[in-house]
Image (tube, rainbow, N blue to C red):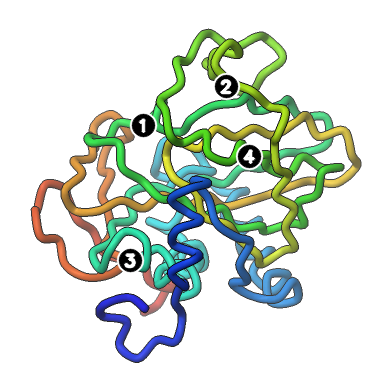
Amino acid sequence: MTPDAAGSSISLSRDEVNRFHVDGYLGPFTLCTPQQMAGRRSSIEKALSTDSTFAWREQSRHLDVPVVFDLCAHPEVVERMACLYGPDLVLWRSNFFVKNPGDKAIPWHQDRNYWPIEPPVNITAWIAIDEARVENSCIQLLPGSHRKVVPHVKATDDMGFEEMADPAYVDTSEAVSMELKPGEFFLFNERLVHYSAPNTSNHRRMGLAVRVTIPIVKVDHEALFEGHKVIMLKGRDTMMFNDVGNPPVEDGQ
């Protein structure tokens, strides 16, 4: 159990903690039922249809949309993260990944390659807003691939990112498909090599990636967008390296 979980019964076993260290990921876990996620989905879709004050509509909407922050800060997510990364947790980014029918593949990659944080320490919760199956491009993972840093090269034109892991350093023969029901999530670290195929189905796949670090990590706010701030999810900001903001509130509060 987390050190200051205030009576929370949400915890990870020693075996689960060891598995995260060995494999670089853990899950799936349940945040809510598919029916409960369906109740949130319309609010999320409304938010994604409106302009944001941030870099683009799908980034860091936890800063201005309460339903998104509530998912990022959900105890099912945060208390498990605390079992792995300690009692002080910093929410520095979130991303919606919306893959519509016909959308390109996201190449094999390590997230640390793209991020303006130092040192590059991060734990991500990938929360399924829609059902994520092989048919509509669920995330694929390479267990144990977090044990080394993989060089990245220019991606091919059929990929959705500009850079990808160098294929010479990636063995995909033991890839795991992380299929999720709406409301389920998994955890992984910044070095786990992962991928999603083109969406060849007739169904959208939407997920929310919740990016969390610890107070010793410095975030380059200017490299993200003007006015960027982090939010403390749990514990204390022991280092005060970063600009800290407050969670969003509902209109009228």
Q: According to the image, label 1 marks what residue?
A: 115
Secondary structure under badge 1?
loop
Q: Position of residue 88 (x, y in %)?
A: 23, 64
Secondary structure under badge 2?
loop
Q: According to the image, label 4 marks what residue?
A: 141
Q: CA distance from mark 2 to mark 1?
A: 13 Å
- Say whether disc 4 or disc 3 marks the residue closer to the N-terminus: 4
Q: CA distance from mark 2 to mark 3?
A: 30 Å
Q: According to the image, label 2 marks what residue?
A: 161
- Asked which quadrant contains residue 251, the reply is bottom left
Callout 1 crowding tier (Cα within 10 Å): few <14, some 14–19, many ≥20: some
Question: Would you say 110 lies left or right of 104 here?
Answer: left
Q: CA distance from mark 4 to mark 1?
A: 19 Å
Nearest to the observer: residue 233 or residue 6: 6
Q: According to the image, label 3 marks what residue?
A: 247
Residue kind at label 2, given as amino acid type: Phe
Residue kind at label 4, given as amino acid type: Leu
